[in-house]
Each structure stands twice: as structure tokens, then as C-alpha cells.
Amino acid sequence: MPDSGLLIDTHVWLWLEADPERLGEPARARMETAARAGRLWVSVLSVWEIGMLVAKDRIRLAMPVDEWVRQASVTPGMQMLGLIPEIALESTRLPDAPHGDPIDRMLIASARVHNLTFVTADGKILACAAQGHLKALKA
């Protein structure tokens, strides 16, 4: 179970694999450092979210989604973060209701429960972090 490092948002994972230049230099550097230390995390919830985006034809990948996930999951230094009951409960207790999207709420809760810095470009989540409710890094 992680206790430090970075948790990347779903869109950050997609960018990392398809368009890393889209990430800001500070985020890219911190992600490389975390990966070298084996502390770069992606949630299994992001796997679900990408699968749903493909199924709804909202994104297209260069290969079948299961192959994409298999390849993207073996990025050196990256680990999968599972869902545990504490995350599910924490997602129902987030201060100031930072997000209505259930997956975003679970990702925020994952970062909080495991004391991870959440890497995202989502303005609502970054605003929540600015209020001190979680650690975040702008992607």
C-alpha cells in the first residue's frame, strides 16, 4: 500500500502515453522522479474510466483498449492502485464537495487516503487542493 508518491489522473495517464509534451515540465519532472523511485501510481478506476470512454466512442486509441492498458501499465516505476473500503468511504466525506463525478471523487479520496500528490489538470480539483483539502500538482 502506498504512503507517498504521485497518483496520476486518468487524462494525465492518457497524455503520458500519447502526448507527454502536453504535460507541464514541473509535472513531467516530478513524475519521472516518482517513477524512478517506484512511487508513480495509477488507479484501477482510471482503467475503468478509459474503457468507458472508448466504449462510448469519446476517445480513440491506437490499439484495442485492453492492449493499450496492458502496455501503459508496464511503464517502468508505475504501479496500479486498487480500491479499498476506506477510499469508497472517504469519497463520500470530501470537504466542500469538490467534484460531482464519482470517479474524480474516488481518485481524490485515493490520494487523500494514501497521502499521495494528485497530478491533474482539472481546475475543480486544483482549487480543492489550493484550499488545503489534498496535495495536488498541476499537470
Image (tube, rainbow, N blue to C red):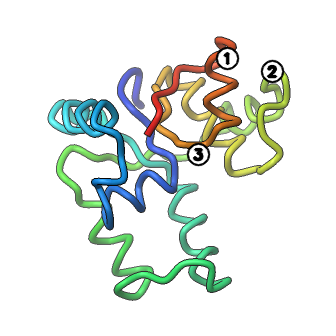
Badge 3 marks a residue whose secondary structure is: loop
In the rendered structure, are the residues bearing label 2 and label 3 in contact, judged by CB atoms less than 8 Å apart? no
In the rendered structure, are the residues bearing label 3 and label 1 in contact, judged by CB atoms less than 8 Å apart? no
Q: Nearer the viewer, residue 67 or 133?
A: 133
Residue placed under numbered mark 3 in the picture? 83
Q: As shown in the figure, which amino acid type bears the numbered disc 1?
A: His
Q: Spatial distance from mark 1 to mark 2, Cα to Cα?
A: 7 Å
In the rendered structure, are the residues bearing label 1 and label 2 in contact, judged by CB atoms less than 8 Å apart? yes
Which disc, if any, is residue 95?
2
Residue placed under numbered mark 1 in the picture? 133
Rendered image quadrant of residue 92: top right
Q: Spatial distance from mark 3 to mark 1, Cα to Cα?
A: 20 Å
Q: Would you call the spot at circle 3 few (<14 residues within 10 Å), some (14-19), or many (20 or more)? A: some
Residue 129 percent location from the top left of the image: 62, 21
Q: As shown in the figure, which amino acid type bears the numbered disc 3?
A: Leu
Q: Quadrant of the N terminus?
A: top left
Q: Residue at x 65, y 32 (%)?
A: 109
Q: Spatial distance from mark 2 to mark 3, Cα to Cα?
A: 20 Å
Q: Quadrant of the C terminus?
A: top left
Q: Is residue 51 above or below residue 103?
A: below
Q: Nearer the viewer, residue 18 or 104?
A: 18
